[in-house]
Every structure is written in structure tokens, then in C-alpha cells.
Image (cartoon, grey):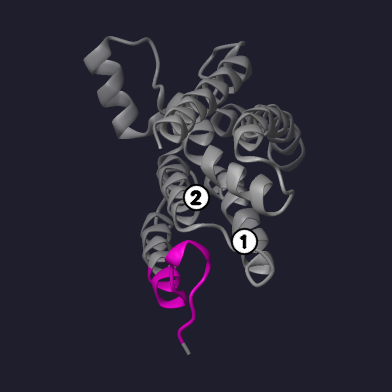
Amino acid sequence: MKFAIKGGITNRSFLVALGAYALFWSALAIHPVDRGDWLLENLLVFVTAIVLGSTYRRFRFANASYVLILVFLAIHTIGAHYTYAKVPAGFWLQDWLHLQRNHYDRLIHFSFGLLLLYPMRDLLMHFAGAHKKWATWLSVAALAALSSFFEIVEAIVAQIVRPDLGTAYLGTQGDIWDAQKDMAAAFVGAVVAALWLSLRRRRA
């Protein structure tokens, strides 16, 4: 039976999108650069899948929110396959801009803020009842807090589960300020998305 959910997406469309990501994830799960690091990186994917799956019948995001979440998970999946410090796209960017390191991890953290602000806003508006204007900027604060929280959790998990994988998992590449720069990238991404939504709302 086909039924509509908020934002116009249908159950069939949602399953197609989810299936496409599942195939992409499965393809990159084959022979990753470092299997141990791959398992740690995919904890985020497993947790996200469990949360979205268990809450699907009670709360359903808008069309755009699911798309943005899947896009973020897709680029994260690429990082998990290669390890963030060895993603080819990061090396291309490094050579093109003459950078000192592979910045794919910065791209991921920037995308965390940029792509997940709309889903966070969706959640605050329809689950917490926040006004559109306040929900946008509360989402910036929430994502900044989550980014900081994840940096702490990543460091703890790396030390407990596989201390020998700490450098690969955290992707510091010798930068002692890596965590702070990652958090800043996420914050900037969220602010950019919030400004775009605010401008769009004013024009509308």
C-alpha cells in the first residue's frame, strides 16, 4: 500500500532513495583501505539508521531533509572507505590549491553544518514547536553543540576501542588544533545554510 508522508514524498520514493544509498554503502564496504577504521567511522551510519528507522512512524522529516541526510551520509561513506586523510578528492584539492594536507575531513564537517541544518530545523519546528525564524538559528546552535560533542566522543571511542587507530580515525594529520578547526567548519556551514534559509524566507 502506497501512502504519502510530509513534504509529498511517498513510501515507495523513500524506499528507492534508501535502497540507492544502501547499494552505494555496500559497494564501498568492499575492501576499504582500513577495515578497523571503517568500522569505527560507520558507527555514525549505524546510529543514524537506527534512530531514523525507529522514529519513522512517529516523526517523518520533510522531503528535503531526507535527501540532505542521505547526501551527508554518502560523502561520509566515501571518507569511511578511504579514511578521511586518504580520500582521492582531498588529494586533488590539495594539489590544486597547493594545501599542506588533505582537507576532505574539513569538507565533511562543513557539510555537517550545511546539509543537516535544514533537517535540524525541520525537527525543531515540527517536534519541538519552534517558530521558523527561531528554529533556524537554534539549529545553528544545536549543530555547533553536536559537532563539539562528536569530537569528544570520537576521541574517547578511539582510545577505548582501538588506541592504535586514533590518528587515522580522528584524521588529525599532525594538527593539534584539528578538532577546533573541524568544529569551526561545521559552525560556518550551519551559518551559511541559516543565512540562505533566512534570505529565502524574506524574499518569499
Q: Does the stretch in magenta take in 35?
A: no
Q: Does the stretch in magenta take in 11?
A: yes
Tell me where residue 106 appears, x and y as whole percent. Answer: 47, 24
Q: Residue at x 54, y 14 (%)?
A: 174
Residue toward you, 35 or 119: 119
Distance from the alpha carbon under mark 2 to that under mark 1: 10 Å
Residue toward you, 2 or 39: 2
Q: Secondary structure at mark 1?
A: helix
Main secondary structure type of the part rendered in magenta: helix
* Residue lying at the far left of the rendered structure: 96
Q: Residue at x 64, y 37 (%)?
A: 135
Q: Which residue position holds label 1?
A: 52
| Tag 2 near tag 1, CB within 8 Å | yes
Q: Amino acid at mark 1?
A: Leu
Q: Residues within 10 Å of mark 2 (few under 14, many from 20)?
A: some
* Residue lying at the far bottom of the rendered structure: 1
78 left or right, relative to 117: left
Above-or-below relation of 200 to 16? above
Q: Amino acid at mark 2?
A: Ile
Above-or-below relation of 136 to 5? above
18 left or right, relative to 36: left
Q: Which residues are magenta?
A: 2-16
Above-or-below relation of 132 to 19? above
The image quadrant where one finds the C terminus is: top left
Q: Residues within 10 Å of mark 1 (few under 14, many from 20)?
A: some
Tell me where residue 165 appears, x and y as whole percent. Answer: 61, 34
Which sits earlier in the primary sequence, circle 2 or circle 1?
1
Tell me where residue 182 appears, x and y as whole percent. Answer: 56, 22
Q: Residue at x 64, y 30 (%)?
A: 147
Q: Which residue position holds label 2?
A: 69
